[in-house]
C-alpha cells in the first residue's frame, strides 16, 4: 500500500507477492506492470521462478549469495 502512494523511479520488492489472496496478487502484478510500462524500474526478489519469468525482462540468480548466472524468459 505504501509503494502505491509514492512517486518513485525504483521499487525494491522482496517476496511481496507471497502474502495475500489471488485477487491481491493479481492487483499487485497489474500495478507493477503499469509502473514498469510508465518507465519505472524494479528490483524483484523472489524464490518463485515462474513469477520472476512472468514479471521481469532480465534476471540474475544468486545461490548462497553468489551470482550463478542470468536467465531469460
Image: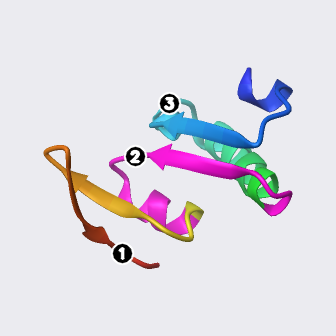
Q: Residue at x 55, y 64 (%)?
A: 56
Q: CA distance from mark 2 to mark 1?
A: 14 Å
Q: CA distance from mark 2 to mark 3?
A: 12 Å
Q: Nearer the viewer, mark 3 or mark 1?
A: 1
> What SS does tag 1 mark?
loop
* Label 1 sits on residue: 71
Residue 41 versus residue 59 in the image, above or below:
above
Say which residue appears at 26% left-offset and 69% top-offset.
Answer: 69
Q: Position of residue 55 (x, y in %)?
A: 58, 61
Residues at marks 3 and 1, CA–CA distance in whole angstroms: 25 Å
Vertical order, 73 against 5 (above or below): below
Query: Helix or strand or loop: what does disc 3 sit on?
Result: loop
Mark 2 vs mark 3: in front = 2
Q: Where, by quadrant of the figure, is residue 27 drawn?
A: top right
What kind of colouring is applied to the model shown? Answer: rainbow
Q: Is residue 64 left or right of residue 2?
A: left
- Label 2: how many Cα within 10 Å (few below 14, some 14–19, many 20+): some
- Asked if disc 2 and disc 3 are in contact, CB closer than 8 Å, the reply is no
Q: Quadrant of residue 21?
A: top right
Measuring from the top left, give residue 1's x and y in whole percent: 74, 23
Q: Which mark is residue 19?
A: 3
Which secondary structure, mark 2?
loop
- Mark 1 neighbour class, 10 Å CA radius: few under 14, some 14 to 19, many 20 or more: few
Which mark is nearer the camera, 2 or 1? 1
Q: Determine if residue 3 is in view.
A: yes
Q: Position of residue 51 (x, y in %)?
A: 48, 58
Residue segment shown in magenta:
37-54
Q: Which residue is mark 2?
A: 46
Q: Is residue 32 above or below residue 16?
A: below
Amino acid at each position: 500500500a505504501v509503494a502505491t502512494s509514492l512517486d518513485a523511479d525504483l521499487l525494491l520488492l522482496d517476496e511481496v507477492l507471497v502474502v495475500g489472496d489471488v485477487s491481491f496478487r493479481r492487483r499487485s502484478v497489474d500495478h507493477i506492470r503499469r509502473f514498469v510500462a510508465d518507465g519505472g524500474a524494479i528490483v524483484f526478489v523472489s524464490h518463485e521462478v515462474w513469477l520472476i519469468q512472468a514479471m521481469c525482462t532480465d534476471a540474475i540468480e544468486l545461490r548462497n549469495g553468489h551470482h550463478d548466472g542470468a536467465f531469460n524468459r
